[in-house]
């Protein structure tokens, strides 16, 4: 039977972890609010010491262990943030921590866990694989398993976000919460609905890992297909039984966002909010920018930026993808004359159109049948989608045969 979590449990967790985790700000975005058409408030959990909301539940769960359990140590499966939180607070509280992370987990998360003193094991393609291996360690070594999204103490710790958010935002019509295993939205939902039942709870998950939506349709947790996603922290194949039982009756709406929408949200947050937020944390902003929260035009909406731990090498690629989605990065091929002046005539059009050339490459061998022409592959920086269309028209009018590549090609 699922274990319930009450507002009293969340209040107790808030008292227990007070002083051990940060009380993060919830601020209205001056840049994003006019774009989305409503007062948009961002709960900045990426400012926690280890960069995510997971610290709340981790500290609460660790502090609730019996003395012999603390001495024996704990283990958990995590894509990174829960692992970091356990490692950090385990070190503070003197509790040995072992974390099993997917092979694709961001390098910085695994490295930071090790630097915090945790034993890190990379295993499998997703959280489900990690969980199976962690269960083996429970049997073999007598460790205590702490579920990063389904343990009642974890859910209660996450719920402290809801209490803080309502204290910080006087007027709010909806709270948008990223959803992976369901622990975050379960805790926030209990707190928000207990204190302000009229506030709507909206869950957001990536299309590539929509396990909670699948569970809602089935009426119970079911295993869903999980594909690689920029929101790797939400890539959970099956939601938690406790989290689902708690959250499902309280959620007013579930939304999914695609990879392009997530990439654009990460870019917008970096440029407009000066906030480095990982894919999971950006899903609420992605939903707003994609017009999926337009029912709240003229109202007040808060979204939880649940984490900011993103691999720096991945960040560069995501920003480029976001720029492509935004029409500010464009790739195309063209056939130009291989005679003297051919390339100059081609680049003159680019210059006249005010595009910045990032890369240009010739292909004389595989560029086509005409021996007097050469194929060039160009990557250019543009202003927006209209600018790309105008560039294409001008190149075609100048006699250049072009093919502009769609982001999904």
Image (cartoon, helix red, strand yellow):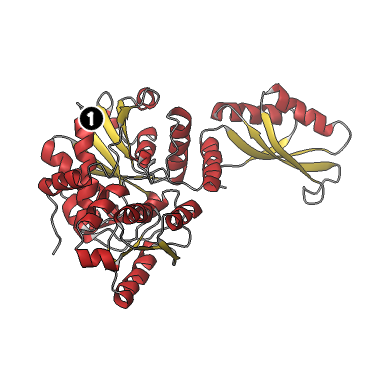
Local crowd size for mark 1, using a 10 Å CA cut-off: few (<14), some (14–19), many (≥20): some
Whole-percent x and y of residue 114? Answer: 45, 58
Specify the farthest residue to the bottom. 140
Residue at the spot x=73%, y=39% of the render?
A: 360
Q: Is residue 224 above or below residue 399?
A: below
Res 163 visible: yes
Q: Which image quarter: residue 130?
A: bottom left
Specify the farthest residue to the right. 340
Q: Is residue 119 above or below residue 185?
A: below
Q: Which image quarter: residue 101?
A: bottom left
Residue at the spot x=23%, y=66% of the render?
A: 69
Quadrant containing the N terminus is bottom left
Of 28 and 161, nearer the camera is: 161
| Residue position for label 1 | 168
Residue at the spot x=23%, y=30% of the render?
A: 168
Whole-percent x and y of residue 176? Answer: 28, 39
Disc 1 is placed on an element classified as: helix
Whole-percent x and y of residue 60? Answer: 23, 52
* Count of marks placed on residues: 1
Q: Which image quarter: residue 139?
A: bottom left
């Amino acid at each position: 039977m699922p274990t319930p979590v009450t507002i009293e449990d969340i209040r107790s967790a808030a008292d227990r972890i007070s002083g051990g985790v940060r009380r993060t700000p919830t601020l209205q975005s001056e840049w994003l609010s006019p774009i989305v058409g409503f007062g948009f408030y961002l709960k900045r959990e990426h400012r926690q010491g280890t960069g995510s909301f997971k610290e709340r539940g981790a500290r609460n769960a660790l502090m609730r262990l019996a003395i012999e359990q603390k001495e024996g140590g704990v283990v958990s499966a995590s894509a990174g943030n829960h692992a970091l939180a356990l490692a950090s607070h385990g070190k503070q509280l003197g509790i040995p921590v072992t974390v099993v992370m997917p092979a694709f987990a961001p390098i910085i998360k695994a490295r930071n866990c090790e630097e915090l003193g945790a034993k890190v094991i990379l295993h499998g393609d997703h959280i489900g694989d990690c969980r199976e291996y962690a269960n083996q360690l429970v049997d073999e070594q007598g460790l205590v398993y702490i579920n990063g999204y389904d343990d009642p103490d974890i859910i209660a710790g996450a719920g402290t976000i809801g209490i803080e958010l309502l204290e910080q935002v006087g007027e709010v019509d909806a709270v948008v919460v990223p959803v992976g295993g369901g622990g975050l939205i379960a805790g926030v939902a209990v707190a928000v609905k207990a204190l302000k039942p009229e506030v709507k709870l909206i869950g957001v998950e990536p299309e590539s890992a929509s396990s909670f939506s699948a569970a809602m349709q089935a009426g119970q947790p079911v295993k869903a297909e999980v594909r690689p996603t920029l929101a790797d922290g939400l890539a959970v194949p099956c939601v938690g039984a406790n989290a689902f039982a708690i959250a499902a009756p309280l959620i007013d709406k579930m939304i999914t966002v695609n990879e392009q929408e997530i990439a654009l949200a990460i870019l917008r947050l970096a440029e407009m909010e000066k906030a480095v937020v990982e894919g999971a944390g950006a899903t609420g902003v992605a939903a707003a920018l994609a017009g999926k929260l337009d029912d709240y035009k003229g109202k007040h909406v808060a979204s939880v930026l649940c984490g900011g731990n993103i691999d720096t090498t991945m960040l560069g690629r995501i920003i480029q993808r976001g720029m492509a989605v935004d029409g500010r990065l464009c790739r195309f091929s063209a056939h130009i004359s291989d005679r003297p002046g051919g390339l100059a005539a081609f680049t003159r059009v680019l210059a006249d159109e005010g595009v910045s050339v990032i890369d240009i490459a010739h292909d004389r061998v595989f560029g086509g049948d005409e021996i007097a022409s050469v194929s060039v592959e160009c990557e250019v920086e543009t202003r927006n989608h209209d600018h790309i269309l105008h560039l294409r028209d001008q190149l075609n009018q100048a006699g250049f045969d072009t093919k502009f590549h769609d982001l999904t090609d």
